[in-house]
Image (cartoon, grey):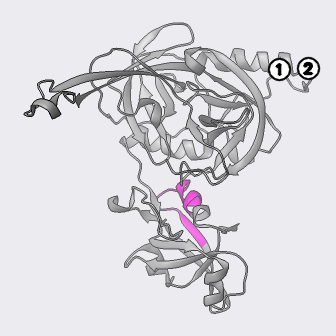
């Protein structure tokens, strides 16, 4: 986890304790139809507002809570045990290895009545056993369908039918100040409901370079990870993921628009195919702009163009400044990386490029990112590569 530049420590909202467990998991793929976008969901109560919102939230919880689950995990691993007397007597340690067991707790929500559940990757990462508890108390063994560490999204399935579900909304339509509800299992306390507002949008908290987070003041604690952040129409607009450790009322959720693309790919293929334009880009600092005699609006500089990639074929060159993508202004490398994270291979995008004082719109098709470029590495001098 990279340190945040805004002066606080971020903690992934997963509860962990020590205990015992068994068996192993592996990824499986399962085909499915694309997730529908919940755009026409009626309000819980037309015309109802706050402060009469207590009944409004209660009605929303009655509708949404049955689709929220508790996920208990067990992680087992063998570690080398160091002999404390080895320095005195020499030779090999007689202790060998010992099995260490760690228990964790997180949350999730059902998106398909056949038992498909969305959660955070960090909730299930490395788990050797998953137990999913439904709102009605039934317990099922869970298996991992697929994980995407880059966005911290995972899909789990259970052997069940006719389950209640939650639909993903469109997080791009969110406004700061909208009321939201978080449901999950903070500190293992299942079926916990908290409410608040959307405090900010597009937060760069530097725990994930591919995600612009939703900030909320709805109380989120360890164990809430993977649970839904729900709008007042009962639609999931984010996955509760992280909190600011030394603050109150500062939590972060992965937007639903990012989640939808990832979940559909994990269900279909068990992995994510990322869209890519084939460039290495860097921050256009005032010093760098002065060296280039660049006096136009903010943008990001192209440091390298990958041969035979989409950008190279479209005529983009090293030293070009990328000003916009599909009309969205680019002020830092993460702006382009996160925009492309929500696009699919084969989609077309239009880049506004500045070269030697001239602006030009260049349209190109997105290709699949090569495996060697999938895992982001620490950038050098602010350089990143979408």
Residue in the picture at 56% in, 7% down: 136
Work out whether 315 lies above or below 210: below
Does the segment drawn in magenta span residue 218? no
Up/down of 285 relative to 167, above or below? below
Q: Quadrant of residue 252?
A: top right
The local secondary structure at tag 1 comes to helix
Q: Tell me which residue sits at (57%, 78%) in the image.
A: 301
Location of residue 325 by image quarter: bottom right
Camera-side residue of 233 and 340: 340
Residue at 52 percent across and 7 percent down: it is 137
Residue at horizontal 67 percent and vertical 91 percent from the top: 357
In the picture of the structure, the residue carrying the numbered disc 2 is: 52
Q: Is residue 59 left or right of residue 384?
A: right
Q: Can residue 296 be spotted in the picture?
A: yes
Location of mark 1 (residue): 56
Mark 2 nearby-residue class (10 Å; few <14, some 14–19, many ≥20): few
Q: Is residue 46 left or right of residue 361?
A: right
Position of residue 263 measured from the top left corner of the image (x, y, whole percent): 49, 40
Circles 1 and 2: CB atoms closer than 8 Å: yes
* Mark 2: secondary structure: loop
Where does the magenta region start and end? 337-350
């Amino acid at each position: 986890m990279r340190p945040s530049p805004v002066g606080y420590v971020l903690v992934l909202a997963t509860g962990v304790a020590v205990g015992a467990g068994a068996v192993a998991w592996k990824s499986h793929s399962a085909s499915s139809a694309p997730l529908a976008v919940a755009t026409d969901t009626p309000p819980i109560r037309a015309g109802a507002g706050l402060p009469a919102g207590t009944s409004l939230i209660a009605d929303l919880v009655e509708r949404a809570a049955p689709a929220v689950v508790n996920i208990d995990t067990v992680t087992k691993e063998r570690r080398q045990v160091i002999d404390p007397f080895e320095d005195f007597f020499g030779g090999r340690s007689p202790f060998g290895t010992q099995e260490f067991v760690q228990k964790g707790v997180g949350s999730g929500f059902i998106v398909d009545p056949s038992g498909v559940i969305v959660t955070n990757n960090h909730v299930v990462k490395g788990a050797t056993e998953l137990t999913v508890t439904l709102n009605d108390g039934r317990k099922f063994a869970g298996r991992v369908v697929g994980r995407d560490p880059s966005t911290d999204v995972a899909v789990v399935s259970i052997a069940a039918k006719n389950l209640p579900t939650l639909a993903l909304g469109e997080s791009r339509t969110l406004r700061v100040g909208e009321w939201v509800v978080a449901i999950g299992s903070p500190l293992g306390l299942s079926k916990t409901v908290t409410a608040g507002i959307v405090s900010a949008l597009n937060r760069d908290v530097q725990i994930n370079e591919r995600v612009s987070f939703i900030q909320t003041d709805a109380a989120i604690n360890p164990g809430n990870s993977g649970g839904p952040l729900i709008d007042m129409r009962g639609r999931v607009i984010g996955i509760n993921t992280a909190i600011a450790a030394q603050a109150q009322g500062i939590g972060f959720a992965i937007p639903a628009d990012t989640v939808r693309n990832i979940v559909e790919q994990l269900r279909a293929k068990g992995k994510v195919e990322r869209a890519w334009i084939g460039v290495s880009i860097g921050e256009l600092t005032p010093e760098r702009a002065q060296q280039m005699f660049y006096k136009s609006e903010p943008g990001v500089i192209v440091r390298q163009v990958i041969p035979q990639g989409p950008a190279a074929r479209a005529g983009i060159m090293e030293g070009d400044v990328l000003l916009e993508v599909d009309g969205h202004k680019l002020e830092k490398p993460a702006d382009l990386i996160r925009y492309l994270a929500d696009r699919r291979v084969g989609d077309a995008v239009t880049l506004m490029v500045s070269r030697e004082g001239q602006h030009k719109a260049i349209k190109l098709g997105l290709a699949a990112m090569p495996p060697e470029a999938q895992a982001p590495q620490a950038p050098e001098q602010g350089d990143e590569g979408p």
